[in-house]
Image (tube, coloured by chain):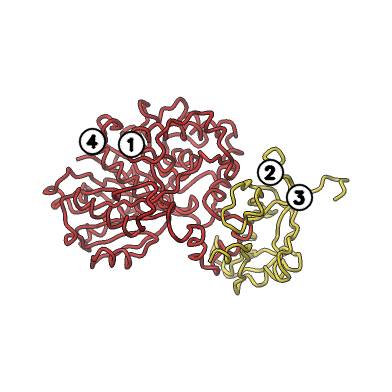
Chain colours: A red, B yellow
Amino acid sequence: MKADTWDLSRSVALVGVAESDEIGYVPHKSALQHHAEAAHNALADAGLSKSDVDGIFTARFSTLTTAEYMGIHPRFTDNTWIGGGSFESHVAHAVAAINAGYCEVALITHGQTSRSSRVPVANSVLDAVDLNQPHPQYEMPYGIVGAPACYALACTRYMHEYGETRTREALAEIAVATRRWAGLNSRALMREPMTFDEYHNSRWIAWPFHLLDCCLATDAGGAVILTTAERARGLRKTPVWVIGAAEAHDHGMISQMPDLTSTMARVTGPRALAMAGIGHADIDLTMIYDAFTSTVLVTLEDLGFCAKGEGPDFLRGQRAAPGGDFPMNTNGGGLSYTHTGMYGIFLLIEAVRQLRGECGERQVADCKIALVSGIGGILSSASTLVLAAD
Amino acid sequence: MTERHDARPLPVAQPESDFYWEKARQHELWLRMCVDCDRTYFYPRDICPRCFSRNTTWVRSDGRGVVHTFVIVHRAPTPAFRGAVPYVAAIVELAGGARIPTNLVNVEPRPDKLTVGMSVVVTFADITDQVSLPVFEPEPMAGESR
């Protein structure tokens, strides 16, 4: 297949990344403020100005509204929304658009106020539901709505196939390791160390999920800027290269997921690695979308880091924590750093900072290649990138 | 705005699912079947989602299946479910392979009372005069009274 042999050849670079000014609980700012602040900060990071931007990308929020708010009149626009991992797809689409000449400077933005939105989030989500669609018709009447209940359905099936105790141990390893990374990130919301007992004793949200299996709900924005290799060379920071990209999805709602124990990362992982021409052993940093602890377990297996059902062995002994030999989710993840609802942009921000060597006490030594894997919807979509330091 | 979301969400039948919901109101479970694939599927679609054949029909299900997976919801996902927690949501695999999202009823919402693979049978929850939802309960053992 042509896409598998698409040689990105360091043709397009990530040149600017940033969060909004304040993240976490920010009741005094709107979602669009977070978009604009993040964009402003990412442009400064890159050494570019707003007038350089000619391509705009965002998810859920209309690009019409987002570009209007910032006073941008793009010649390329991409509103792809496949869930919280949309921003990983935006990177792939930006690479294609820039290589095709549709735009030269691509701005991907995100802003969301899941904690402090003045319209309660549950209401705005429900207001946005088109009642003609299958999910409100066949799942919502049963209370199969909201991420915890839906993702938990997949987790129960995994436990059935691979063992409840083993699975539970792996989920605890992920929660505790991720919190340890958050302790090294001053922008993380939850920085206090978490013990294994605290994990196991936290209240049930949707069995098999404890509270500490679930991501945060925060207010934040993030932005990422890409441009051509030629232009990247003259900018403020060293470029970070996109050397592999793949996306796929196989369902919309959870009851339609063909195999509840396996996401489409089983397709995007191998495809992105093949495009990059690297193997798992070449990866220095792994950033995986952690809406729930179980999302990480399943995605790691699907990406091919270990065989199906062997994730609990792979993760044993805090090897994904600071000091371990498998650095993962080094910003503290959606579980402990920030999770606005669509977290994917923050995976990119951390990967770029690690590849530039900007991460201070949580810096992964000699970080040259990062794998970033987004998940979106209800384990519906997978979007995987391989990024490389200059 | 809040009040609107306090009521349990009801299905809005579509042209290709009017029959499904009308039969549910009569306490019957009907599935779409692809004649070319010789398989039933869920949810109702006129064109088979597997082979894209238009040669599809309706068949009545005997309502027997096994729990493919379940969740015990403790924190209400929306205001409408505040009075319902804890409740059990599930995906049930019917004979023939179709998987249907549903609730498990007449069983305690406790992990030690529920298992993936347990046999269940359809029953119907009359939500309004017009809407009955197919839900599932543990299949009685031979000789057990219901």
Q: Mark 1 = which residue?
A: A185
Q: Mark 3 = which residue?
A: B106
Instruction: List x then y, in percent, for residue A165.
Output: 59, 31
Callout 4: SS: loop
Mark 2: few, some, or many residues within 10 Å (few <14, many ≥20)?
A: some
Q: Earlier in the sequence, mark 1 or mark 4?
A: 1
* Displayed quadrant of residue B63: bottom right
Callout 1: SS: loop
Which chain hosts label 2? B
Could you tell me how far apart the alpha carbons at marks 1 and 2 are, in whole angstroms?
44 Å
Could you tell me how far apart the alpha carbons at marks 1 and 4 are, in whole angstroms?
14 Å
Q: Is residue A68 above or below residue A213?
A: below
Callout 2: SS: loop
Callout 3: SS: loop
Q: Mark 4 = which residue?
A: A357
Kind of residue sitting beneath label 3: Asn
Let me know if residue A71 appears in the view: yes
